[in-house]
Amino acid sequence: MAGSSSRGAAAALLNASGLGAGYLYLRLWGRAVGSWFVTALLVLTALGFHASGTPWFWITVFALWLARMVYSGWKHGSAGPPGRRPPWLPLTAGTALLALVIAGAVQYRGGPQDALERGDAAHAAGDCATAVEHYDAATATHNELTFSPALDRAADGRAGCRVVLTAEAAAGEADYPGAINGYGDYLARYDGNPPWPGAEDRLAGLHLDQADSLAADGTVEAAYAAYAAIAAGFPGSVQAAAVPDRLDALYEARTTALADGNHCPAVDELRPFLALDGEHRDDPLAEDLAGRARDALPDALYACGMDDYRDEHYSDARTTLEEFRTLYPDDPRNGQVGDTLIATEIAQIGSGSTGDLPDPTPAGSAPGGTATVEIVNDSPEALEILYTGAETGTGTVDACGGCTTQSDLLSGWSGTACQAGIDRPTTTIRLPAGTYEFVVRTPGDSSVTPFHGTWELSSGTAYSDCYFIETSYP
């Protein structure tokens, strides 16, 4: 019996390797093949069902199967006759085989952990491309039977790194919103404490890249908002420290016309910076830029209006100069602005459909170096006189209460316009001698055609003319 007991122990020990060696020792070929089949089936099933995710279940399954094989080897070995070989030989072989299997299992189990550690090191250094290679090695299917938690940790690290790699791919294509969102997801994944400590700095750098891109190609508002987000979101960072200089560069880059003295484009350049004060109230950075624009706008606006007038862009000149007068009512240049607006209106009227003012009629003498112009109103409408030359200004003549509108059907033989004996309203304008443009119009009735003319007023001459309104018929 002793021989049978040692034979059973040897078979049990050989089967403890999980390789069915005890059955081979007992020459139970069918059981050996059957054990291999069951073992292979268990292995394939475990690999397919992510055994490392439920390690204790599969450890229990394999332990029960191994215990079944050990018991079967002991049972069948003990039931047979003693072997011919010395009992120590199969026991030694069984012990050596079990030791070899255990050593291999230990080494096999340590493989995923080693790969995980290499992956984590690369991840922490920000080298996610290399880290993913190590994580892939750790999570290889053949490592499932290690039942190591390293596989799940490696899978998590790989998922985080893939977010980084996707974000970097977006950054490489200048898709800054995509890259920024990617890094935001990465930081959120780890509650702001990711394996790669440089991720937040990289995110700040992407925000700066996006702001620089907008500064080059976007609107002032979009670029400013992007820079302001860096200052607010990453205080104390290198990128936040760079924001003031970047905003200075933005202002300089977007006000080149101002620097070149190109006044009308300069006005358009300044308006977006002026708007920052309203959009970002109480923001010192915005207030600084808006303040620089406010300081530059009066000169640019004034010069633009004057340029438009000289270039005969009368509608633009009127719009710009009226804006100047509204925004800066106390500016000492408003006298010149008012004169230019009058001259602009005269030029606009003169370039349109008007009647021709005849040369003024000399009616006497005036003090030397000056000329006087008397306007008599023989119409039921008030008249407005606009003039520009050596001096620019306006005058008015009240409506004539007892006067009527004349008819061109009757004016040839029974008209009564400007006849003597009626007290009509008048005004007299005293001017330096010279060449003037005059406009006479009725401000209360836009249907009356204004009259325009260029007069040469001689020194020491008094002029007087009577004006009436005549209705024309086809």
Image (spheres, helix red, strand yellow):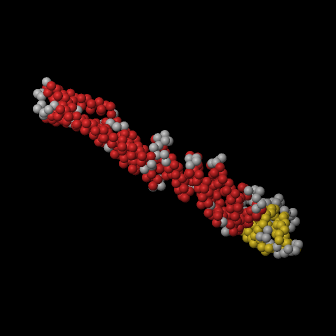
Image coordinates of residue 462 in percent, x first then y, are: 85, 72
Residue at screen point 15% across, 25% down? 2
Residue at screen point 88% across, 72% down? 367
Q: How many marks?
A: 0
Q: Is residue 130 left or right of residue 31?
A: right
Residue at screen point 65% across, 49% down? 284
Please state which of residues 354 and 220 is positioned toward the viewer in this rendering: 220
Quadrant housing residue 65: top left
Residue at screen point 20% across, 27% down? 71
Above or below, comparing residue 72 to residue 403 in the picture: above
Q: Is residue 112 visible?
A: yes
Q: Quadrant of the C terminus?
A: bottom right
Q: Is residue 449 left or right of residue 199?
A: right
Q: Is residue 71 left or right of residue 396?
A: left
Please state which of residues 149 and 292 is positioned toward the viewer in this rendering: 149
Above or below, comparing residue 286 to residue 147 in the picture: below
Quadrant housing residue 407: bottom right
Image coordinates of residue 170 in percent, x first then y, are: 45, 52
Image coordinates of residue 93 in percent, x first then y, are: 19, 36
Image coordinates of residue 193 in percent, x first then y, are: 49, 41
Please state which of residues 452 and 155 is positioned toward the viewer in this rendering: 155
Above or below, comparing residue 417 to residue 150 in the picture: below
Above or below, comparing residue 444 to residue 131 in the picture: below
Q: Is residue 31 visible?
A: no
Please state which of residues 17 and 58 is positioned toward the viewer in this rendering: 17
Q: Is residue 5 left or right of residue 369?
A: left
Q: Quadrant of the N terminus?
A: top left
